[in-house]
Every structure is written in C-alpha cells, then in structure tokens.
Image (spheres, rainbow, N blue to C red):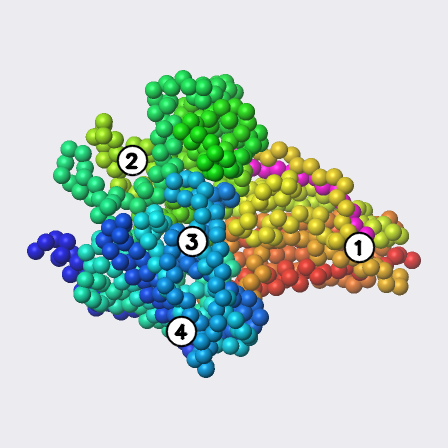
C-alpha cells in the first residue's frame, strides 16, 4: 500500500474514533458569564471551504450565520456597522511600523451575499453598504489598495435579536502568503451558546494541522473532500480577558495548506519535499540581507558600501579591544536610537524612486534610515563589526508561540536580529523604526522568555554550493528579566503652602528594567508602545487638571541591561487642597500610578492570569508644610501579601510640619491560576480604593 494512503487511513481512523475533549461550561455558569456582556451569540454556524489544489486556482470560501442578542447601547455600537472580510485569527498584535499598515484584511475579496433579518419576526432588514478603500503595502512592496465592505443594518435597537448571514471568497493567488498558516479560535470576545464549525478541503491537498488543547473534530469524507466538524456549546466570551493568554488553554485549530506549488526537488537528488511556509513569509527580509551579505563578501566598493564601511570602522575604532563584539553592538544601536532619524519612505513606497538603486548606506551616513532599508542597514553594519547574525522571528507572548505550523507573524510583522557574539552567545536587537527605540539586548516583556525562529542566509538554497533548504526548525529562547531589576522608585519632596493651597513637587523617578523600557519615552515625548496598558504612560506629574510642569529632564539611559535611567521633575498644583473650616483635605490618590488591569472584577474568570512582568513600583512622598500641622484622621496601615503581589501603604508624621507617605507594590509571580484570581482582585480593589485617598490635617494650635 502507498505509504501516504496508509498514513492517511490511520490518521482518519484516529480522528473518527476520537471524541471532542474540550470541557464545555455548564448552563448555569454560562448564564452567569454573560450577565455583564454587551452581546450574546445564541448560535453561530461557520463554514470554511478550501477549494482547489494549486494556488493559482484555489480560493477560500467563508460563510457565516450568527444569531445575536443586543443587550445594551455598547453592544449595538459594537455590532453595527459590520465590516468584512474578517481575519480568521483576530488575536494578532501588530508591531510593524505604521507605514506598512499590515493590520488589513484580504485582497480582491468577492462578497457573495450579506443578509440580515429580525429573528423573532423573520422579517428581512434593510442593509446599507459602504465600500472602504484602504492603503496597504502589496506583495510587490509598494502602496496599493484593498477594499473593505461595511454593512449597516437599519432600525436595530437594544433588545433586538438579529440573524446575520454573509459569505465571501478569498482568492489564494493574491493572498496566498497570508493563508499559509491559519489559526482559528472557537471562543470569541462574546459568549456563544451554540457553535458549529465546518472546515472542508480537497482530500488530495497535502496539509499540516494542529488540534490544540483537546479539540479534535469529527471527520467526514464527502466525495473528493474531507470535512472537519466541531459542535460546541456554552463557550464563554473570554478571548479578551485582561492578562489572559488564550492559546495556553483554549481550544484552537491550525491549518497549513501545502500546495504542490510549494514543492521543490533537492540538488543532485530526486528527493522532493515541501518548502516550509516561513521561508516564503521571510523572503522579503532575507533577500535584502542576502544582497548585503554578497556585497560584503565580494568587497563591493560602491558609494553605498563605502558609506557602510566608514560607519562600521568608526564603531570598531571606538572599541578596538572588544574581542566579543558586545561593546561595538551597544555603541551602534545607541547611534541608531539616539542619532538616526527614521523616514517612513513614502516616496519609495509610492514608487516615485528608483527601487533598483539602493542608497541605505549613504542615507545612514547622513543620519537617516528609511523604512524599506531598515533590514539592509543591520545586514551590512553587523558583519562590518566582525559579527555574524540570524534573523529572529518571535510571536508576542500574549497571543501565541512560534512553531513550524504557526508562522503567521513572520510576514511583515515581528522581527529581531540575533547577533552571534564572538563568545558563542546570542544577543538580540530590535531594529530601529518609528515605534522601536530599544538598545542592544533590550526587549519588552512580551518578547522575554519566548522561543524565536532563527534563520541564517545559509538556510536558503544555493545552486553553486548545491545547498538545499535547511528545514530544521531552529529556535532559541530569549532572556528573561528578574524581579530585582524591574523597578520604578519615585521619591518626591512636596512643599505645602496652606495659605495659598499650593503644592510644589520636586520629584525623582528611577527606572530600571521593564519600567525603563516601557515608560521612559513618555517623559521625552517619544513614541510609546500602543499595544500595552496605557497606565504605563501616565507621567508622575499628571495629578490634577491645573498642574504646571516647570522643568523635567532625564539622564541618558544606560545602554546595557537593565537600562537604568533617572528623571527629575518639578511641578506644582493648586487644585488638590480643599479647605473646610479649619481643616485641609489633600487629595493624594493620583500621586501613585501602579499599572494594573481595570477589567479584572467580580466576573467569572476562565483564563489564567499572566502579569506583564515581575517587579516593584515604589513611591515615597515627604510633605513639608509651611506651618505645624496634625493629622485629624489617622489612617490604618495597609499591608496585603499573597502569592500574586505585595501591596503596602503608610502615612507617618515625621515632625510637626512633615508627613511621609509610602506606597509599595510588587508583582511576585509570572502566572496566577484562574482558580486563584481572587488574589489579583484583592490587590486591584485596594489599588482602586487608594486612587480616592485623601488626608485630612489641621493647624496645630
């Protein structure tokens, strides 16, 4: 028997006899889960048909029918209007530069139908259609346009139950590179009472699949097709739980089509195999790096290469005894972050420049890096420093983990450079862009402690060397920061003038580790990471509407781990003191800014909770009054310690005119089991209470 047929029969038999092992929640727990939801999906039927065997003729037909209850105004706004096409995987977090605009749907989509009806009366509802044009980078690397379709259902109101049906086709020939790795979660943002997914494909199409977290389907043979069928009930709307990592525990399905278009024959052999998808997804980057490698190898003395050479030699001269290469890389990346201006390359992407002539080296010599040349700069300079490197492809730890099957983020999204130091260690650098201003070996928390895919130019085939694709999936784990290195220490002397109701602050903020990486740009009016909790960007002086910042300056961060820096700020406010008879109420709650997730409340938790990182956030305010005072109402010390965190708050009168406020908040663990989520709720509840804290003093007689 043909080995492929035998393997197929064994796999089919296993799937047919397996049961859906995903534990669905009880009816009572499901009812409890949707009490505070804006929408409830009573029934969702989705069919995905992968039609054809070769990309030129293949297409994906996606058909969905949903019956939805609109519970409130927010739900109505969320539902209406509806935009299609929708990505199969809505868990992506994008980190590419803004000009690349990769958060887009598919090209040349054909809408087959869109219908809406009132579920109770079965009356068809009028639907208005609006076609939106969106600028994107096309597969040729230049600006193009795609169309999105926006549907607005008329006369919908809160309390309605509406059924939406829509279907569209996605052609593979224009979207194939985005359809090489398809992940779909069964849960969503909103609860689903009944859910059915049918995934159908030609049985002669070679595929790779993963049924993650106990979600094996029923498998049915339909003439020339195989169909996977899932029937699930009572799926809570937990995909967006704050601090959750759905891929760790929720069921999902990964589908990797392997068209014979992607098959190649080994050199000097008749062996044939499929090219792994990540080679195609990374090719735009790798081809640029390969060009730079050859320019270095053959000693190209073009004006561009001479400019590169001059820059490399400058950093070598700055650290002539750096046998490892560490200091040279630190100096180079500091230059990129501090001195080089990022250019979004609008003219290039608009195809108004000669794209056959590269000027990345010349541009860099003038202190500019253009978006389309970012990879070229690193690909030329790093070898010029006497070092080799790999491209390193991560996945944001909040949404997934790189694997041979899950490589969707390799195309256009996440990229690091793994620099092979001369002591046989690997150092990581995130290339400079409009959003990325990180020093060498500086990683935001979502890239710490994760596997990254490493690719080298020698992993690609070479006809002269008779070298085939290196299909070994090479990964390495990135470093993790520790609790003692991740801290923010805020120390402030506050002069209190009770006669004028004025507070004058002299504040010093010491940042280290992740607190430096995530928050320091907020004090320099530089781009901040829009994908993380905005509480990280709340500056220390944001304490009232009338605050006046007199001065603020920051020491240059250390360019090595843990990237410490200190900020000195001077500001005042007159809106924080209220006078009542002979007493004074001082609002102090806004002075403390621990980052926490607001959405973790009394609702049932379905996912484990992952803090961003372990570390401490400490505050000390010394209030010096212009007159002797006394506390009217003593405040009990607060001290909460559990496995998740440690939180304490104290007020002490240090002298007749001095009060000392201390606030300490430490995250102690990287994961809290969902069964222990009350530990997080307990800490967050105290943090929210302290946001409204006031102290009451009176003058000493």
Q: Quadrant of residue 87?
A: bottom left
In depth, the one of 34 and 433 nearer the eye is 433
Q: Determine contact: label 3, label 1, CB under 8 Å.
A: no
In depth, the one of 685 and 574 nearer the eye is 574
Query: From the viewer's perspective, is residue 507 above or below residue 681?
Result: above
Q: Determine contact: label 2, label 1, CB under 8 Å.
A: no
3D distance between C-alphas at marks 2 and 3? 31 Å
Residue topped by disc 3: 105
Q: What element carries label 2?
A: helix
Q: Furthest residue to the bottom?
A: 121
Residue 43, label in figure: 4
Segment colored magenta: 560-575
Label whose residue precedes the other's in the sequence (3 or 1): 3
Residue at 36% from the left image edge and 35% from the top image edge: 286
3D distance between C-alphas at marks 3 and 4? 25 Å
Residue topped by disc 1: 575
Categorize mark 1 by other alpha carbons within 10 Å: few (<14), some (14-19), many (20+). Answer: some
Label whose residue precedes the other's in the sequence (2 or 4): 4
Q: Determine contact: label 4, label 1, CB under 8 Å.
A: no
Residue 191, label in figure: none
């Amino acid at each position: 028997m043909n080995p492929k047929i035998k393997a197929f029969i064994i796999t089919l038999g296993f799937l047919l006899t397996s049961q859906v092992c995903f534990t669905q929640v009880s009816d009572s727990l499901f009812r409890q889960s949707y009490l505070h939801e804006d929408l409830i999906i009573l029934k969702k039927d989705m069919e995905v048909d992968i039609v054809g065997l070769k990309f030129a003729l293949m297409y994906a037909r996606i058909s969905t029918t949903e019956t939805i209850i609109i519970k409130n105004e927010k739900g109505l706004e969320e539902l209406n209007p509806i935009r299609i096409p929708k990505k199969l995987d809505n868990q992506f977090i994008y980190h590419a530069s803004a000009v690349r605009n990769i958060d887009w749907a598919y090209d040349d989509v054909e809408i087959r139908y869109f219908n809406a009806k009132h579920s109770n009366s079965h009356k068809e509802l009028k639907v208005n259609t609006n076609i939106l044009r969106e600028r994107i980078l096309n597969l040729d690397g230049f600006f193009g346009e795609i169309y999105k379709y926006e549907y607005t259902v008329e006369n919908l109101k809160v309390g309605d139950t509406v059924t939406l049906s829509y279907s569209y086709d996605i052609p593979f020939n224009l979207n194939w590179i985005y359809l090489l790795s398809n992940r779909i979660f069964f849960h969503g943002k909103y609860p689903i009472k009944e859910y059915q997914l049918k995934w159908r494909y030609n049985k002669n199409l070679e595929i790779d699949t993963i049924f993650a977290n106990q979600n094996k389907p029923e498998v049915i043979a339909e003439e020339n097709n195989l169909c996977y069928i899932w029937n699930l009930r009572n799926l809570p709307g937990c995909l967006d739980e704050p601090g959750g990592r759905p891929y760790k525990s929720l069921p999902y399905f990964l589908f990797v089509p392997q068209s014979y278009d992607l098959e190649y024959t080994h050199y000097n052999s008749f062996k044939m195999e499929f090219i792994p998808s990540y080679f195609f997804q990374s090719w735009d980057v790798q081809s640029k790096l390969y060009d730079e490698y050859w320019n270095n190898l053959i000693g190209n003395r073009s004006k561009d290469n001479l400019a590169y050479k001059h820059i490399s030699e400058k950093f070598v001269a700055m650290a002539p005894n750096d046998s490892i290469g560490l200091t040279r890389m630190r100096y180079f990346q500091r230059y990129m972050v501090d001195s080089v201006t990022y250019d979004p390359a609008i003219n290039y992407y608009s195809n108004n420049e000669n794209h056959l002539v590269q000027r990345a080296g010349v541009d860099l010599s003038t202190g500019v890096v253009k978006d389309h040349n970012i990879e070229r700069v690193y690909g030329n300079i790093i070898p010029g420093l006497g070092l080799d490197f790999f491209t390193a492809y991560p996945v944001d730890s909040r949404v997934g983990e790189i694997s041979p099957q899950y490589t969707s983020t390799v195309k256009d999204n996440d990229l690091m450079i793994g620099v092979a130091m001369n002591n046989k260690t690997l150092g990581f650098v995130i290339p400079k862009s409009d959003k990325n201003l990180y020093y060498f070996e500086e990683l935001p928390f979502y890239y710490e402690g994760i596997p990254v895919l490493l690719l080298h130019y020698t992993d690609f085939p070479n006809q002269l060397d008779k070298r085939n694709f290196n299909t070994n999936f090479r990964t390495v784990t990135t470093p993790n920061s520790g609790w003692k290195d991740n801290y923010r220490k805020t120390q402030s002397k506050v002069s209190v003038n009770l006669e004028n109701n004025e507070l004058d602050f002299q504040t010093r903020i010491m940042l280290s580790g992740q607190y430096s990486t995530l928050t320091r740009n907020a004090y320099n009016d530089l781009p901040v990471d829009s994908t993380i909790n905005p509480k990280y960007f709340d500056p220390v002086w944001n304490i009232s509407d009338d605050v006046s910042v007199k001065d603020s300056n920051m020491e240059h961060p250390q360019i090595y781990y843990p990237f410490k820096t200190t900020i000195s700020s001077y500001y005042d406010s007159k809106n924080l003191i209220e006078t009542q008879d002979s007493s004074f109420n001082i609002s102090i709650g806004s002075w403390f800014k621990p980052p926490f997730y607001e959405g973790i409340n009394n609702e049932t938790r379905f996912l484990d909770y992952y803090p961003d990182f372990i570390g401490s956030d400490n505050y000390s305010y010394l209030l010096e009054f212009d007159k002797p005072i006394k506390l009217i109402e003593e405040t009990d010390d607060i001290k909460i310690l559990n496995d998740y965190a440690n939180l304490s708050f104290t007020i002490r009168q240090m002298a007749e005119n001095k009060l000392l406020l201390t606030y300490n908040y430490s995250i102690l663990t990287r994961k809290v089991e969902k069964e222990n989520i009350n530990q997080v709720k307990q800490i967050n509840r105290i943090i929210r209470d302290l946001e409204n804290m006031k102290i009451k003093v009176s003058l000493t007689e």
